[in-house]
Image: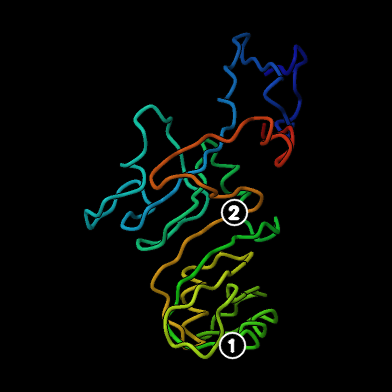
Amino acid sequence: MKLNGTTLDTPAVKVTAKDKISVDGRPVGAADATRLWRYHKPSGLVTTHRDPAGRPTVFENLPPDLPRVVSVGRLDLTSEGLLLLTNDGELARRLELPANGWIRRYRARAFGRVAQEELDQLKDGITVDDVRYGPIDAKLERGQGAISSANSWITVSITEGKNREVRRVLDALGLKVNRLIRIAYGPFQLGVLAPNAVEEIPRKVLREQLGKDFA
């Protein structure tokens, strides 16, 4: 095997898309360039390529001209909002790791009474059913207080993204989430992207946010 014309004596070599690799004198084709898309997932779709229960999936609803992609994390059946899609499995795994510090931000509509002081306590984390959740930033949206027992909108920011984390944490505070919308994943925003719409993130933005190795 040769890298840029030089024979390799070890397989532990980092390469980039600009490097030229050959095996037994034959060039090895470069991998497809890393791409990332914003997708506005509507409620009622499962985030899987194939569902044993026959429910409609995210990937069945994507445009036919989109290459094969994987999702960065998941949104459950009734959750909606921003879902990142990529053709690079390594990138998906990297962006899912809590260690990257990327904040996942949601708007939750919940039924029940809660005071901002109670939500502030989530900054120290919380244990629910023997599962420990890290620091959570939760804020009642402006003009809403604890005196109303009707639906309230709460903005919730997390970094771990454990299974059904927002729903379970708010349920522990006596709140029943009846709508959950992810509005941001790290630096990428849902914005005004219409439900079921897909929009590719420009390569310039990828380089700025992910570094040249991924873009």
> Callout 2: few (<14), some (14-19), or many (20+) C-alpha neighbours within 10 Å?
many
- The kind of secondary structure element at disc 1 is loop
Residue 91, position as x, y percentages in the image:
60, 42
Estimate the spatial distance between the alpha carbons at disc 1 and disc 2, rounded to whole Å: 26 Å
Marks 1 & 2, CB-CB < 8 Å contact: no
Instruction: Please name the residue that numbered disc 2 is placed on.
Output: 185
Give the residue drawn at x 61%, y 82%: 119
Residue situated furthest left in the rendering:
54
Number of numbered callouts drawn: 2
Instruction: Please name the residue that numbered disc 1 is placed on.
Output: 115
Residue 79 against residue 208 in the figure, above or below: below
Mark sitting earlier along the chain (1/2):
1
Residue 15, position as x, y percentages in the image:
72, 28
Relative horizontal placement of residue 37, taking residue 157 as reference (left or right):
left
Residue 145, position as x, y percentages in the image:
56, 84
Residue 181 against residue 203 in the figure, above or below: below
Residue situated furthest front in the rendering:
143
Residue 183, position as x, y percentages in the image:
54, 56
Of badges 1 and 2, the one in the foreground is 1
Type of residue at label 2? Tyr
Type of residue at label 1? Ala
Give the residue drawn at x 55%, y 25%: 32
Q: Closer to the camera, 125 or 142?
A: 142
Residue situated furthest top in the rendering:
25
